Amino acid sequence: MTYKGEFYQRDREWHPPALTPDYKTSVARAPKHALLSLQNSASEITGPVFGHDDIDPMDRDLIHNYARPGEAAIGERIIVHGQVLDENRRPVPNTLVEAWQANAGGRYRHRKDTYLAPIDPNFGGCGRTLTDENGYYYFRTVKPGAYPWRNWVNNWRPAHIHISVFGTGFAQRLITQLYFEGDPLIPKCPILNAIPNPEAVQSLVAVLDMNATIPLDTMAWRFDIVLRGRRSTLFENRLEGN
Amino acid sequence: MAQHLDYLKETPSQTAGPYVHIGLAPGAAGFDIYKTELGKDIAGPNAAGERIRVEGVVTDGIGAPVKDVMLEVWQANASGIYAHPEHPGEVEDGFRGWGRVISDFNTGEWFFDTVKPGAVMGRSGRPMAPHINLWIVARGINIGLNTRIYFDDEAEANAADPVINLIEWESRRKTIIANRSEKDGKVVYRFDIRLQGENETVFFDI
């Protein structure tokens, strides 16, 4: 099999820059030198491939995947669902999507989190799934709580779910955060507002999707994810030899 | 009005945050949830080639270790083949070439065990010296940082490598070359990563 084309260049003005002083931790962790731009080679165009042997179907159900038999996580029951597409609007099938989050009280199950909200014994806080042949994915979970963090004295993270996606090439690797429509903490968040373009910020806000709710059971939020697109094979790219 | 291009925009990146381990390496966060955690075995039992360990620490602009970092590794096998349907050639059964590396929460030191990759064919038929691709995420890093690990015992291949040669300042090239030594009969490469400041590692926009 031969290569398809390179990935479209990442729009660095759309993503948050490395140095965003209002998000204080970035100050000492941001490279000062310019990134060196590389044209894609095999090292960037390839990436890990995952299959159904790698994960369990239950992994996508955060309400139950860490709960004791017959019990469930506490909180507002939600479905998070959407499609993984590339910039050419093509679905990205069979790709690994991972999620992690705080519990309904805003507490993470992590040895480093000491926030006073209690741990939910039935909630681990992570899930994973593969997109189907049309790029669709879904998780079942509880809506995470907002929580305070040390940046300015009085910063609160809006409710959010961390999302990790692979795509087909290592150059598409992406970690982001999903926020919830209508959260008044969204405009106040220095991490979210590290993204300079307001339209880009809005693309991280999931919308309430009444049509996907399960009546009398679970609310639903829609969150589509876009990975870098690829050039078609119309033009000679000379990724390989010959 | 001109016509309109109908491309989508890539979803913007956000920091992985301090609790990245919950999602991607729950064992390190302190709990067991999945039957199999992904990314723990890079090369598998059948891979040919030299077994090596790569170790290092990521430091910030103050020179302090970054203790909540997560690295992802992507590499070819010893024959220079990536485990991917678009790469011509076969890899050994069980070789994935991808792994996740978590630093020690107290010291920031990390390591991973793998096989040394072979040279990979690069663009326009120019071979690339053996290297391991790295993606670095942590709290305070708004978008994952890409770099490569090259090997100091591959001086000739490194000198001809098309990527190393793109680095205009020769003094910066050494920041992506790991140093080989032997410890207790084991081959260990040291690869420290400096996010900022003196000897800042070369990061790529791939």
Image: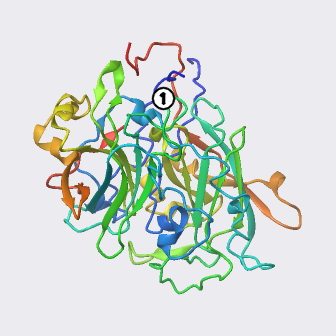
Work out whether A20 lies above or below A101: above
Give how far across and how far down residue A83 sits, in percent: 68, 43
Residue holding disc 1: B89
Instruction: List the single residue furthest toward the left.
Output: B171
Q: Position of residue A23 (x, y in %)?
A: 37, 63
Residue shown at 37% from the left, 63% from the top: B69
- Is A18 left or right of A77, judged from the image as shown? left
Image mark 1: chain: B
**Res. A157 in view:** no
Q: Which image quarter is the C terminus of chain B in?
A: top left
**Label 1's element?**
loop
Count of numbered marks: 1
Q: Is residue A145 left or right of residue A34?
A: right
* Quarter of the image with the N terminus of chain B in it: top right
The front one of A28 and B187 is B187
Which residue shows up at 23% across the image and 45% down it?
B176
Give percent across and percent down for residue B28.
Answer: 47, 71
* Residue appearing at x 46%, y 29% in the figure: A8
**Amino acid under disc 1:** Gly
Vertical order, A186 against B160 (above or below): below
